Amino acid sequence: MMKTTKTNLTMLAKGCAFALIVGVVLQFAACSKSKDINPSDEEILTKKIEDIIPQQYVDSLTKLGFTINKGTMPPNVDGSYLFKPFTIKSSNIPNDPYTPGYLLMDGVVKFYEQSTSDFSIKMLGKNFIGAADTSVVTAISGSGNKFTIYGKVKAYRNGGYSFYAFLMSGEKDGNSIKNGIAGIINIDDSHAGPNTIRKGQGRVAFDGDYTSEPTDFNSKTTAITERNTISSKPSQLK
């Protein structure tokens, strides 16, 4: 009789343990499914940024003095802005002729169609990577009046092309941007032509008077085509 009772208790214990394991697995699966269906703002933004620029390249730019403004409530930055005097801050390119303090051609950037739901934004630029830059995919982070924009640009040069990450940070101040800073880094040089910077190499430059005023983007001399490439005209940062 005692043996039968012990056996029953053992079976009951095993049954309870099995039920507990199944319950934990089902709960985990339900949470994972819910997470996939209803990701948080942080998860949406993190995934979007990772699709543009792997963390190792973000780290490389921050080592060069680039500022990352995190957060899921960035200010609205729609508009066009002039970076002048556009000044080299730092570089990790061996024997780079663009030394700190070197004055580049004026940079002009246009942001538009900023989304508060998926943190997307469209970006056009002149004289950042090339004469005309169009981001293939772009995201924005930040909080308060501070922001960081992450873009990926396909740049053609010397019979080849590379993918660059093009990042910009600053503080929205009325219709202007204060403390504007830009960083570019090659993230894929597998199809690059000669005489281009290589994978992992990049530069950081900033607005030398710390105020990027609004401007008429279309009044500048370089023509922009809204497509998923940039022109093959000579560049100053790549």
Image: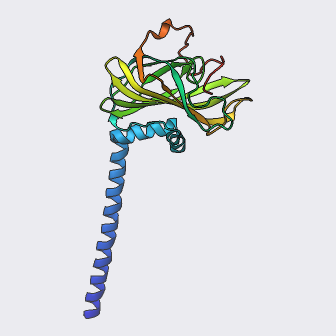
Q: Is residue 93 left or right of residue 211?
A: right
Left or right: residue 160 compared with residue 19 = right
**Colour mode?**
rainbow
Res 191 seen here: yes
* Residue 19 shown left or right of residue 96 in the figure: left
- 180 or 59: which is nearer to us? 180
Residue at the far front: name it. 101
* Quadrant of residue 149 within the rendered picture: top left
Q: Position of residue 49 (x, y in %)?
A: 46, 37
Q: Quadrant of the C terminus?
A: top right
Residue 181 location in percent, x, y? 47, 29
- Which residue is nearer to you in this view: 29 or 194? 194
Q: Residue at position x 25%, y 93% from top?
A: 2
Residue 169 lies, in percent from the top left, at 43, 30
Looking at the rendered structure, the number of numbered marks drawn on it comes to 0
Q: Is residue 221 above or below residue 127?
A: above
Q: Is residue 28 above or below residue 144?
A: below
Q: Residue at x 36, y 54 (%)?
A: 29
Q: Nearer the viewer, residue 21 or 112?
A: 112
Q: Is residue 186 visible?
A: no
Q: Quadrant of the N terminus?
A: bottom left
Rendered residue at 53%/39% (across/down):
64
Q: Residue 186's x, y, as percent?
A: 61, 34
